Image: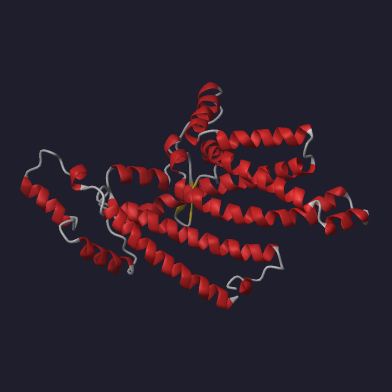
């Protein structure tokens, strides 16, 4: 275990360095933020002063070296637009995105796994066909369109839930969380459902395929032959095994939701990292974009490590020491 963790951390450090180079070059070589940040009527002296203040007058390699030395000290630069350190600006929005992603994935698991198992156990019957037909909608509907439909139906027509914003929050250790209040849940539910629809469809298909495969295994047939109840066979002998691919895929999907819930956060005016990213891209706020992408890389690396460990716990046959072979 220790050797495996050291190996994975070394690989992660290499990936992080490589991504830092690619992200920096890709972001800093595109566009000129001065054109966005400075009034077009500003004179040449004011324009030059702003360029020097932002450090854009230096060669690209010198800007990168300055970026690396500061990054090693935990400083990813200052936002051009907000005149604040980029990393704290993103971390301030991170809890809202984590909250949205966490609730969406819980919905996907607790709705998708039972429906997928029902579809697998009743394949070819009306219940199974209906569930699979519903999963196709989850894959097919554009994310922004279904978000607008949710707002129109549940916020505008029925008036049950608010159309946007985060609602009332409660601070825990200095961090505001909306899921701790009823008003917060009211604001959280629609965007979480919007994110969860696609993930739920994915879980349904994974759980259905896993259920149909596991149902044919000898240990399931033996459990039934021993006279165990169908409930025990499904919940004890089948559920644990179908969760192995579900956990693996959902680990990566969780990273995707955290990093790229941009459309949902924009449609529902959810104050998370995705909305900040869109605003930063529009205004060419390079430090914020770079800090966002690097934080995303760290999140993906951490989630992959957790998924590998969870995978080995779910299936004792899998040993972390074997992954390097």
Q: Is residue 118 left or right of residue 106?
A: right
Give the position of the C terminus as an image quadrant: bottom right
Q: Position of residue 182 (x, y in %)?
A: 56, 39
- Find residue 270 and report its image quarter: top left
Q: Is residue 186 above or below residue 103?
A: above
Q: Is residue 139 left or right of residue 211?
A: left
Observer able to see residue 166: no
180 relative to 141, above or below: below
Q: Is residue 84 left or right of residue 163?
A: left
* Residue in the foreground of this view, choosing between 98 and 165: 98
Out of 138 and 102, give the one closest to the viewer. 138
Q: Residue 202 location, x and y as percent?
A: 61, 44
Let me know if residue 34 appears in the view.
yes
Figure label count = 0
Q: Is residue 77 above or below residue 162?
A: below
Q: Tell me where residue 24 sits by quadrant.
A: bottom left
* Of the pair 213 and 10, the residue shown nearer to us: 213
Residue 42 location in percent, x, y?
Answer: 10, 42
Q: Residue at x 44, y 39 (%)?
A: 263
Residue in the image at 45% along x and 37% along y? 165
Q: Measured from the top left, where is residue 125 in percent x and y?
A: 79, 34
Location of the N terminus (image quadrant):
bottom right
Q: Kindly give the residue lying farthest to the bottom in the view shown.
A: 3
């Amino acid at each position: 275990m220790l050797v495996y963790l050291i190996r994975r951390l070394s690989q992660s450090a290499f990936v992080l360095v490589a991504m830092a180079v690619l992200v920096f070059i890709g972001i800093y070589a595109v566009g000129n933020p001065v054109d966005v940040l400075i009034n077009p009527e500003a004179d040449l002296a004011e324009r030059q002063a702003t360029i020097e203040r932002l450090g854009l007058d230096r060669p690209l390699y010198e800007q990168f070296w300055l970026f690396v030395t500061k990054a090693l000290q935990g400083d990813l630069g200052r936002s051009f637009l907000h005149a604040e350190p980029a990393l704290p600006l993103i971390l301030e929005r991170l809890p809202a995105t984590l909250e949205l992603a966490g609730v969406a994935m819980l919905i996907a698991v607790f709705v998708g796994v039972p429906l997928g198992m029902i579809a697998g156990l009743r394949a070819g019957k009306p219940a199974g066909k209906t569930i699979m037909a519903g999963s196709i909608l989850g894959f097919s509907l554009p994310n922004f369109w279904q978000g607008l439909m949710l707002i129109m139906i549940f916020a505008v027509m029925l008036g049950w839930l608010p159309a946007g914003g985060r609602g009332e929050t409660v601070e825990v250790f200095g961090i505001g969380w909306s899921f701790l209040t009823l008003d917060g849940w009211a604001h959280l539910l629609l965007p979480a459902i919007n994110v969860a629809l696609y993930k739920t469809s994915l879980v349904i298909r994974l759980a259905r395929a896993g259920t149909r495969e596991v149902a044919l295994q000898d240990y399931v047939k033996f459990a039934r032959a021993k006279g165990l109840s169908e409930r025990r066979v499904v919940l004890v002998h089948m559920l644990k095994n179908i969760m192995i691919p579900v956990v693996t895929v959902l680990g990566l999907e969780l990273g995707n939701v955290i990093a790229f819930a941009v459309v949902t956060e924009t449609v529902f005016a959810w104050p998370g990292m995705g909305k900040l990213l869109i605003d930063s891209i529009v205004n060419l706020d390079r430090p914020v974009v770079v800090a966002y992408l690097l934080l995303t890389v760290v999140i993906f690396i951490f989630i992959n490590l957790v998924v590998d460990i969870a995978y080995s716990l779910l299936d004792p046959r899998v040993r972390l020491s074997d992954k390097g072979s």
